[in-house]
Image (tube, rainbow, N blue to C red):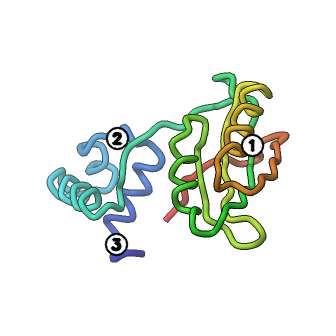
Amino acid sequence: MENLDDIDVRILNLLQENSWLSYNKIAMKLRLSVGTVFNHVKNLQKRGVLQGYTVILDWTKLGYSLTALVLVQTEGKHIMEVETEIAKTPNVIAVYDITGDYDNVVISKFKNRNSLNVFIKGLLAMPSVRRTVTNVAFSAVKEDFRIKL
């Protein structure tokens, strides 16, 4: 793990559980000084390990009842520009380079079939996109990007 020490790992695990924890609360939980916690967090930010703080939303309670996994096949020399364009779309939550017959998988959330339809047609209208295959998730068994370090 990119030169993380035990304190870094413990801080990251706490922040994954609750990113609102203050330096004081982290210091108390880990039995460290506030200055030590502050320095470690700043160092993690500077190194790009800690890139931001966020919340975990229940998408269905916000009306986003459709999760789509879209496989995208692109003309080889345009893969990166297509990925960059797709990643700018508000409903897209992840874009991955993958191996196999397709170049990317796009994970996105939609409130209804019509908005998904518009998204797919927009992808297919991109000049470098050859084809797509869309899968719709029936339910989310697990949807959590946190990993216990």
Residue at 36 percent of width and 52 percent of height: 51
Q: Earlier in the sequence, mark 3 or mark 2?
A: 3
Placement of 81 over or under 20, stated as above or below: below
Q: Which three-letter amino acid code belongs to the residue tagged 2?
A: Leu
Q: Earlier in the sequence, mark 1 or mark 3?
A: 3
Q: Which three-letter amino acid code belongs to the residue tagged 1?
A: Ala
Q: Element type at marker 3?
A: loop
Q: Earlier in the sequence, mark 1 or mark 2?
A: 2
Q: For marks 3 and 2, give the CA distance.
A: 20 Å
Q: Where in the figure is residue 56, as x and y percent of width and height?
A: 54, 37
Residues tagged 3 and 2 counted as in contact (Cβ below 8 A): no
Q: Element type at marker 1?
A: strand
Q: Quadrant of residue 90?
A: top right
Q: Residues within 10 Å of mark 3 (few under 14, many from 20)?
A: few
Q: Where in the figure is residue 147, as x and y percent of width and height?
A: 55, 59
Q: Which three-letter amino acid code belongs to the residue tagged 3?
A: Leu
Placement of 29 over or under 89, stated as above or below: below
Residue at 18 percent of width and 58 percent of height: 39
Placement of 94 over or under 61, stated as above or below: below
Residue at 24 percent of width and 60 percent of height: 46
Give the camera-side residue of 21 and 146: 146
Question: Label 3: which residue?
Answer: 4
Q: Where in the figure is residue 28, as x and y percent of width and height?
A: 28, 48
Q: For marks 1 and 3, give the CA distance.
A: 35 Å
Which of the labelled discs sits on residue 21, or is there none? 2
Residues tagged 1 and 2 counted as in contact (Cβ below 8 A): no
Which of the labelled discs sits on residue 68, or is there none? 1
